[in-house]
C-alpha cells in the first residue's frame, strides 16, 4: 500500500508543470548563482535533460501516442451478453463517465446487474447509476477495496456466490489493461470496456497517469507473485475480511 500511495503523490507532483519547470530552472541556474562549481555544472546538465524530457512527456502528441500504445493489446468487444457489468472506482472526477458507459451497456441488455467496486467510490457510483434510471435492485457493489488487486478479490468474493463468471469491466483506458490481467487472474472471464478520462484532465495529468500505469504493467510479473497469496485466499476468509472492515457490500450500497 505504501508504494501505491507514493505513486499517487508522484503523479500529483509531476502533474503540475509550473512546479516541475520552476524546480528544474532553479537547478539549471545554480552554477551562476553559486559561481559555477564542477558538480553544479553536472547538476545543470542533468536538469536540462530532465526539463527537455519532461516537456516531451507532457506534450499532447506524446500523450496520444502513449494512450494508443496502452490500448492496443486490449481485445475488442464481441458484443456478447455477460453475467455482470463491473465498474472500478478511481476518484470522483472519473465517476460520471464510467457511470454513463455502464448505464448504456445495461440499457443494451448486455448484463442484468451492475457492480461497483472501490472504497469511497462504490456508494457514489451506485447513486449516479440510479440517476441514470437503473433500478436499485440491479445495482450492487463493494466499498472496501483500496487497490486493483482488492477490487478483483473482493468483487470475486461477492459475485462468485451469485454464479457470476463473465463480466464487462469498465474503467479508464490507462487502467484497463492492468485491470484485465488482474481480474483474469482472479478467475473472471473479462471483456474490457473503456470509459473516457474526465474532460477536465490536463495533458500533464494524463501523461503522469499513463506513466504510472506503464510502470505497474512493467512490474506486473513481480507484483503477481507478491499478490498471489491474496488471489488464492479462500472466499470465506475474504468475506470475513470484508465484514471486519465494516464497509458497504452487496445491495446495501
Image (cartoon, rainbow, N blue to C red):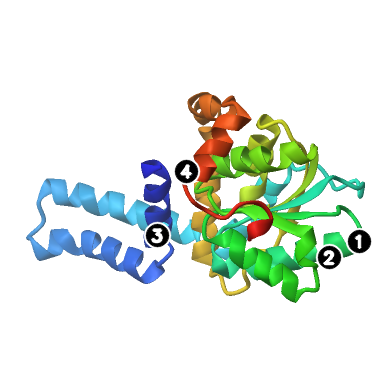
Q: Which residue is mark 1?
A: 108
Q: Residue at x 41, y 42 (%)?
A: 1
| Residues at discs 2 and 3 in contact (Cβ within 8 Å) | no
Q: Earlier in the sequence, mark 1 or mark 4?
A: 1
Where disc 1 sits, the SS reads: loop
Q: Residue at x 85, y 48 (%)?
A: 77
Q: Residue at x 69, y 67 (%)?
A: 97
Q: CA distance from mark 4 to mark 3?
A: 36 Å
| Residues at discs 1 and 4 in contact (Cβ within 8 Å) | no
Which label belongs to residue 104? 2
Q: Residue at x 11, y 65 (%)?
A: 33
| Residues at discs 4 and 3 in contact (Cβ within 8 Å) | no
Nearer the observer: mark 1 or 4; the answer is 4
Residue 19 picture location, percent across and down: 33, 68
236 on left or right of 75: left
Pick the residue in front: 202 or 2: 2
Q: Earlier in the sequence, mark 2 or mark 4?
A: 2
Residue 153 picture location, percent across and down: 60, 37
Q: Which residue is mark 3?
A: 14
Q: Is residue 217 in sight in this rendering?
A: no
Q: CA distance from mark 3 to mark 1?
A: 40 Å
Pick the residue in front: 156 or 97: 156
Query: In terms of image quadrants, where is residue 183?
Result: top right
Q: Residue furthest left?
A: 35
Pick the residue in front: 45 or 213: 213
Q: Earlier in the sequence, mark 2 or mark 3?
A: 3
Where disc 4 sits, the SS reads: helix
| Residues at discs 1 and 2 in contact (Cβ within 8 Å) | yes
Q: CA distance from mark 2 to mark 3?
A: 35 Å
Q: CA distance from mark 2 to mark 4?
A: 35 Å
Q: CA distance from mark 1 to mark 2?
A: 6 Å
Amino acid at each position: 500500500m505504501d508504494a501505491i500511495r507514493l505513486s499517487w503523490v508522484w503523479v500529483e507532483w509531476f502533474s503540475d508543470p509550473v512546479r516541475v519547470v520552476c524546480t528544474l530552472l532553479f537547478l539549471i541556474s545554480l552554477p551562476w548563482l553559486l559561481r559555477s562549481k564542477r558538480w553544479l555544472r553536472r547538476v545543470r546538465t542533468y536538469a536540462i535533460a530532465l526539463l527537455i524530457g519532461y516537456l516531451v512527456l507532457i506534450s499532447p502528441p506524446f500523450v496520444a501516442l502513449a494512450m494508443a500504445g496502452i490500448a492496443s493489446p486490449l481485445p475488442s468487444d464481441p458484443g456478447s451478453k455477460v453475467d455482470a457489468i463491473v465498474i472500478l472506482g478511481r476518484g470522483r472526477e472519473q465517476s460520471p463517465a464510467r457511470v454513463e458507459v455502464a448505464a448504456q451497456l445495461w440499457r443494451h441488455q448486455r448484463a442484468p446487474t451492475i457492480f461497483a467496486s472501490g472504497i469511497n467510490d462504490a456508494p457514489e457510483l451506485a447513486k449516479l447509476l440510479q440517476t441514470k434510471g437503473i433500478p436499485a435492485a440491479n445495482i450492487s457493489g463493494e466499498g472496501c477495496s483500496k487497490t486493483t488487486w482488492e477490487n478483483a478479490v473482493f468483487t470475486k468474493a461477492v459475485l462468485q456466490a451469485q454464479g457470476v463468471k463473465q463480466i464487462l469491466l469498465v474503467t479508464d483506458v490507462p487502467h484497463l489493461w492492468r485491470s484485465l490481467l488482474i481480474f483474469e487472474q482472479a478467475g473472471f472471464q473479462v471483456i474490457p470496456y473503456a470509459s473516457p478520462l474526465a474532460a477536465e484532465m490536463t495533458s500533464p495529468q494524463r501523461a503522469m497517469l499513463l506513466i504510472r500505469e506503464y510502470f505497474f504493467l512493467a512490474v506486473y510479473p513481480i507484483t503477481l507473485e507478491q499478490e498471489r497469496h491474496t488471489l488464492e485466499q479462500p472466499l470465506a476468509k475474504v468475506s470475513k475480511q470484508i465484514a471486519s472492515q465494516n464497509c458497504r457490500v452487496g445491495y446495501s450500497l
